Image (spheres, grey):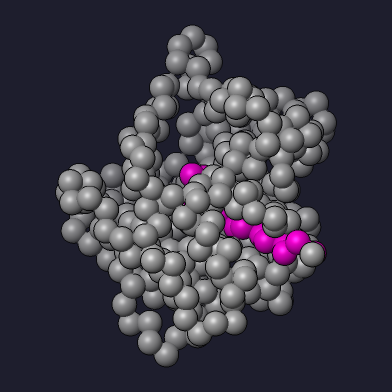
Amino acid sequence: MKQKKIVTIGGGTGSFTLLSGLKNYQYDISAVVTMADDGGSTGKLRDELGVLPPGDIRQCLVALSDSSDEWRELMNYRFESGGLEGHNFGNLLLSALEKINGSFSSGIIEAIKILNVKGSVIPVSEDDMRLTIKLNDGCIITGEKELDENQQIRETGIYEVRLAHPVRANKRAVRAIENANFVIIGPGDHYGSIVPNLLISGIKNAIKKTKARVIFVAPLTNKMGQTDGFTVEDYVQNIEKLIGKKRINFVVYNSKKPHKNMIKRYEKKEGKNLLVMCENTKNKKYKIVEGDLLRKEKIIKENGDKLAHTRAFIRHDSDKLARAIALITEYSEYKSLNIS
C-alpha cells in the first residue's frame, strides 16, 4: 500500500510532540519548520556565527529519529556552565554541519543520515527570517523572542505580526505541500510557530493550490496579549485570513480539562480565558475531531534551559494526538469523528 504523504507546518515543542507520535505510523512525513526563532541558544548562534536558527529543526530531527536513546539524549543535551552555558549540543552540531556543507539544508541532510531520521525535515526558508510585532498602541517590536519575554506585549496586546522583510519559500517545502495527501498546521504557539510560516507567500500559495486535506491542531491554551480569549473558530479564521482562502477541513481539539491546580497556576500568568474553547462551529466547513489529548506525565524542567519559564507545561500527548490524525487519514469522509 502506498504511504500517505503528510506535511506538518509549525515549530518548537508542538512539532516535536506531533512528530514523535506520527513516526510510529506508516506515513511519508515531511516537517516544514519555521525559521523565525531568535531566542536562547539559537539566537546566540544566529548572531555570533551568522547561521540559520537550528533549535526548531533539531527538535523535529530528534522527534523523527530512529537512532539510539543515547544519540537523542545527546542532541538535546544542554551545557549548564562555562563558555557554552545555555547552548544545546544539537544546535551546535547543526550549525557546524551548515558551515561544513555550505548550506543549512545540506547540513540537515547529513544530520538526517547521522540520526537515522524517518522522513524529511525542511526549513520553511533559507533566508534570514525575522519578525516585527506591532502592538495595539502602534509600538513596533522586533524579534520572535520578544513574544515570550516582553512584558509590554502582555500589557498592550498584539495588533499584527509581520516579516521584517520578505523571504523566499524553500522550494522543497512548496513541493512537499503541493504533493501532500494531508497538511497539518500546528500545534504550537500561534504567533511564534504557526503564523511565521504563513507569512511567506510561497507557502500560503502552496496551501491554496494543494489538493491535500488540511488539518489544524488547535492549541490547548491561549496567551495573554496574543490570543486572549481565542476560541477554535478565532484561530481558524485568523489562519485562513493569512492563507487567503478557506482551506481547513478538520480541526483536532482537546475536550479534556487539565487538572484544576494546573489551570489556577496558568491563570496567574495568562489570565482567566486560558483554555481554548470550541464554540460556534455549526455550519462551518471543517469537521471537529475531539477527545482527551492531554499529556498526563509531569513535564520535567531541563537543566540549563534559560527559557524554561516561557515553556508550556500543559501539553498534548504524542500518542493520543497521532491517533487522532490517523483517524482522520483513514476515515476522512465520515461526517463526524470522535476519539473519546
Please name the residue shown 58% across and 63% down the image: 326
Which region shows up in magenta? 2-14
Vertical comparison of 247 with 123: above or below: below
Residue 173 is left or right of residue 317, and the answer is right
Camera-side residue: 281 or 236? 281
Confirm whether the magenta stretch covers residue 113: no
Which image quarter: residue 204? bottom right
Whether residue 330 sits left or right of residue 176 in the image: it is left
Task: Give the quarter of the figure containing the C terminus.
Answer: bottom left
Residue 107 x/y as whole percent: 76, 34
**Taking the image as drawn, is residue 285 in sight?**
yes
Which residue occupies 72% across, 62% down? 5
Residue 162 x %, y %? 51, 59
Q: Is residue 81 left or right of residue 31?
A: left
Looking at the rendering, in which quadrant would you find the N terminus? bottom right
Q: Is residue 6 magenta?
A: yes
In the displayed orientation, state which residue is furthest to the bottom. 283
Residue 59: x and y, percent? 57, 39
41, above or below 84, in the image:
below
Vertical comparison of 24 with 203: above or below:
above
Q: Picture quarter containing residue 178? A: bottom right
